[in-house]
Amino acid sequence: MTPVASVPADLDQWLTAHQGDAVDELFAFLRIPSVSARSEHAGDCRTAAEWLAARLSHAGFTTEIMDTPGHPVVLGEWRGAGPDAPTLLVYGHYDVQPAEPLELWTSPAFEPEVRDGRIYARGSVDDKGQLYLHVKALEAHLAVRGTLPVNVIVLAEGEEEVGSVNLEAFLEQHRERLRCDGVVISDSTMFAPGVPSILSSLRGLAYVQIDVRGSTSDLHSGMYGGAVVNPAMALARILSTLHDDNGRVAIAGFYDAVQAWPESVRAQMRTLPFNEEHFRDEVGAPALGGERGYSVLERLWTRPTCEVNGLLSGYTGEGAKTVLPAVAMAKVSFRLVPDQNPTVVEQLVAEHVKRVTPPGVTATVTPLHGGRPWRSELGGPLHEAGVSALHAAFGTAPVITGEGGSIPVVGDFERILGAPVLLMGFGLPGENAHAPDEWISAENFRQGMRAAATLLDQYGAAKSR
Ligand code: BES
Ligand code: ZN
């Protein structure tokens, strides 16, 4: 058994004394609208990268802003522990999702505000707050002790929310420089308030766009309707073939690579206090749905899915317009589980759509982005250090959870850098990530800094034992 550590008093004092600064600085970070999906925000993404690099330099890191074909990567390095000490890589993302619909925010998305112990802003929890708590933890060590117990690399990217398309190549290209013994990421949620959590799995993603085309231009629906195939109806028919009546994805071969979930992990899951009715209440839907034969947590964490993320066709403005649209479009994403492969799934989808497209229209399937699913082997010094650090900060041992979302690069870290990944998140259910009124609990931001600071000590001690 790992002895339960406490948060080192020197670091704890510094973090308490600088809590106000930490929040002020996070506010400055949150005011930069670094929306990676929108080209008009490319300058803001760079500004966010520069802001972060400046904070890392201030903490005592050597920093570099490294260009990629997309938004830049911020690389911070502190190697004062020497070549024999372990190296920990801290990964996070400084980019955020678009803030729309803006009118649904209680306070503007890029004007952070604290209400009821929550810091509201786009990116507060996903991921600026969770990234910055690590920066403050590192700063605490260097300010108080003038040193860190391990070498540290901070890698912050600006394209996580658009699929980390350039990061895999970046890791390959800088493999030697990024060599490390472990990776820690805070870009996920805790199971419940006061229940620290370590993530043991993430789903992968295959995201495609389906475009259906009929006539060369929109047509009068009275003069032509009935004699010309309607692309909106054709698309609806295509989409209706994606699931069977049991909520399973009805694409041939889709489940071929799906591995059974280890019984030990499923047993763990059953011990978590999860109430499906509370969950239904939280999402506000009249009833829950999904694949028959699985609990809600199993559906979310262990099963692959197919979801329409966007639909567009015809007239959608005020009142009525009698028109037969020429085109229809759907954005469709698939969440994947081990060992499904995004490229293979894209191909299966394209074949399926080809097979079910009715005559009279053409359909094309364009892959947008993808990421591999991930499941960890729990255990080892980094995991143990994470357990101790969370226990110390929150006063209770962490639970092991799964996750329905994706962090595409996690599998790449293991594959390319050969390093285990620890996912300790500080978000909470209902945090509105990707939605209006996103927030991070101010308390969790604070506990996260304490946990991250403790993790460094624990990891240093574990690795040198
Ligand atoms: N932080 C999220 C992923 C996440 C959410 C992990 C909740 C654990 C708990 C991440 O920033 C994200 O949103 N990822 C995208 C990836 C996609 C754009 C490739 C996702 O899951 O939709
Ligand atoms: Zn996100």
Image (cartoon, rainbow, N blue to C red):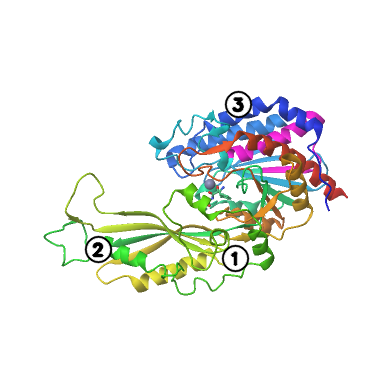
Q: Position of residue 248 (x, y in %)?
A: 46, 69
Amino acid type at image mark 2: Gly
Residue shown at the point (49%, 71%) measured from the top left? 254
Q: Is residue 40 left or right of residue 401?
A: left
Number of the label disc, if any, that sits on residue 24 = 3
Kindly identify the residue that appears in the image at 70 percent across and 55 percent down. Answer: 417
Q: Which sits in the foreground, 315 or 69?
A: 315
Q: Neighbour class for label 2 at 10 Å: few (<14), some, many (≥20)?
A: many
Q: Which residues are magenta?
A: 128-154
139 magenta-colored: yes
Q: What amino acid is found at the position of numbered circle 3 in the picture?
A: Asp
What residue is rendered at 72% in x and 28% in y? Answer: 16
Q: Is residue 48 visible?
A: yes
What main secondary structure does the magenta stretch of the protein show? helix
What's under tag 1, amino acid-wise? Answer: Pro
Q: Is residue 258 one of those drawn in magenta?
A: no
**Badge 1 local density, few (<14 within 10 Å), some, or many (20+)?**
many
Q: CA distance from mark 2 to mark 3?
A: 54 Å
Q: Which residue is mark 1?
A: 338
User: Which dot marks residue 440?
Assistant: none
Indicate the position of residue 14 as horizontal and vertical percent values: 75, 28
* Horizontal relation, residue 387 to residue 92: left or right: right
